[in-house]
Amino acid sequence: MEIFAAGMRWLAEGRLNVDGLYATLPPSEAQRAYQALASGRAERLITLFDWRETEG
């Protein structure tokens, strides 16, 4: 657990560069994202869904 905590701290401090590792998409793009991941055509290693747009 210490390693995880250190990694989270480094992320918060900007000591780890994660630019280009993930894509952020709206939930409305979920089907397209899942298809790309399943077929191996995803542009990024990780896909995150930004649910803030759905808050109302």
Image: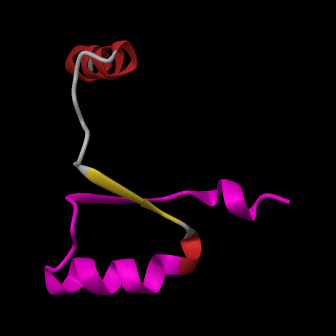
Locate residue 28: give its quadrant: bottom right
Residue 23, placed above or below residue 32 = above
Stretch in magenta: 29-56
Q: Residue at x 78, y 58 (%)?
A: 55
Residue 8, magenta (yes or no):
no
Colouring of the image: secondary structure
Number of marks in the rendered image:
0
Locate residue 41: give its quadrant: bottom left
Residue 46, placed above or below residue 30 = above
Report the residue that reaches farthest toward the right: 56
Q: Where in the figure is residue 24, as x and y percent of width and height?
A: 43, 57
Left or right: 15, with 40 as reference point: right
Q: Where in the figure is residue 48, as x and y percent of width and height?
A: 42, 57
Q: Residue at x 47, y 78 (%)?
A: 30
Left or right: 56, with 14 as reference point: right
Q: Where in the figure is residue 49, as x and y percent of width and height?
A: 50, 61
Left or right: 6, with 26 as reference point: left
Residue 42, magenta (yes or no):
yes
Q: Nearer the viewer, residue 17 or 6?
A: 17
Q: Quadrant of the N terminus?
A: top left
Residue 43, placed above or below residue 31 = above
Q: Residue at x 32, y 18 (%)?
A: 14
Q: Where in the figure is residue 3, as x and y percent of width and height?
A: 20, 18
Q: Residue at x 24, y 36 (%)?
A: 18
Q: Quadrant of the C terminus?
A: bottom right
Residue 2, placed above or below residue 46 = above
